[in-house]
Image: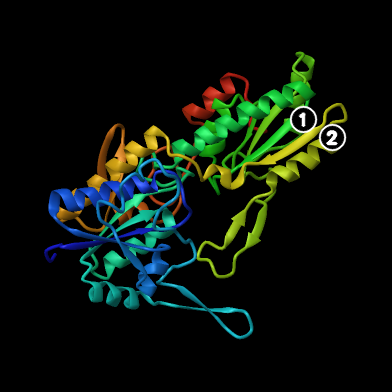
Amino acid sequence: MKQIKKIGIITGGGDCSGLNAVINGITKTAINTYGLEVIGYRRGYFGLYHNDFQVLDLKAVSGIMHEGGTILKASNKDNLFSYPFEKEDGSYDYKDVSDVAVENMKKEGVDALIVIGGDGTLTSARDFHRKGIPVIGVPKTIDNDLPATDVTFGYNTSLETITDALDKIHTTAYSHDRIMVVEVMGRNTGWLALEGGIAGSADVILLPEIPYSIDKIVDKIRDRDRHGKSFAIIVVSEGAKPKDGEVHVREIVKDSADNIRLGGIGDVVTRQLQALIDNHEVRYTNLAYIQRGGIASQFDRMIGLRFGVEAVELLMDGGTGQMVRCRGREISYVPLEEVVGSGSTGETSHGGAKYVDPKGQMVKAAKAIGISFGD
């Protein structure tokens, strides 16, 4: 690998708190420790394709640690290995335009990339590594569904947001004897619903990994009534589905590589419960994009900063095609080839998404304190 003098940073996929902490860690380490030049591509791979970037110096990253989102902006529509071109009839052709990105890097003298993102973004990072570009990946997702790392930054801040929302909704549910249904993000994994629901004193938690029966939810509500608890909090992951049913798709985004958008299952559950329960009002709240924003928690600032520092250290030690990760309290790394791939189940599994184990310790703990999963 040739000597690295200039690196480019990409933030792809959805935004989350902690991204700016990573950018801060990368930029300051690259400049202070190694005397490198740093640029940041705007709007993820879109910026790499269109050669749209900004210079990152110490002034540019000053005071950004606590800010949510990303100063580089982000996009989840730009897979350069399958880039959409709209035809006259409104349909799309998909072409590999990755060579354009490589030429843009050469033109600007960029020797390596540090790519911050989730499964889709890191899959492209792996593919650029296969083309001979030195690449280091940094795991990012509020869903905490990336394998090979115990936790991703952004997740903790989202959990704090969910917990705070449930604390507030709890008082309204109690005051009006209502059933409150709260939908949270997570795509096809239930980590946000599970940990946020437990911390927020939910009575029912519906996960993608545990198909539910609406009758079991009704049974839980009636059981609470019998014990003098005339309200309930139900947390629903956007990817939850009924037994013998399918996930609820909110929309299909034609020009996106990840084109299926889940959402609305909480509304479905609310209407079903209202038809089955006549002694309670049932209300629905979708936390939606509130979960992505806000000031980064202390944990996400620290792990994001450490990821950024380690990414530069790894790159300058000759590493490429690796993703930094958190194992216990230590930051290490793992090949991107082991991170992106087919799905798997388990709390710390490799390959594809990292799913909640229906028989794992956290689910058992929730059931032990009386939380129902509708199963």
User: Is residue 367 shown above or below 109?
Assistant: above
Determine whether the residue tagged by mark 1 lies in a helix, strand or loop: helix
Q: Position of residue 317 (x, y in %)?
A: 14, 52
Query: What residue sits right under mark 1 in the picture?
Result: 218
User: Is residue 227 shown above or below 147?
Assistant: above
Q: Position of residue 365 (x, y in %)?
A: 52, 23
- Which residue occupies the foreground of this view, 7 or 243? 7
Query: What residue sits right under mark 2 in the picture?
Result: 276
Residue under the point 78% across and 19% down? 225
Residue under the point 77% across and 27% down? 178
Q: Are marks 2 and 1 in contact (CB under 8 Å)?
A: yes
Q: Report the residue that reaches farthest toward the right.
A: 278
Chosen colour scheme? rainbow
Q: Which mark is residue 286?
A: none
Q: Give me the C-alpha separation between circle 2 and circle 1.
A: 8 Å
Left or right of residue 302, residue 95 in this image:
right
- Which residue occupies the foreground of this view, 105 or 181? 105
- Which residue occupies the foreground of this view, 170 or 198? 170
User: Is residue 122 shown above or below 174?
Assistant: below
Q: Position of residue 322 (x, y in %)?
A: 26, 54
Residue under the point 47% across and 61% down? 75
For residue 342, what is the image quadrant?
bottom left
The reply to whether residue 277 is visible in this rendering is yes
* The N terminus - image quarter: bottom left
Q: Report the residue that reaches farthest toward the bottom.
A: 88
Name which residue type carries label 1. Answer: Val
Name which residue type carries label 2. Answer: Leu
Residue under the point 19% across and 54% down? 315
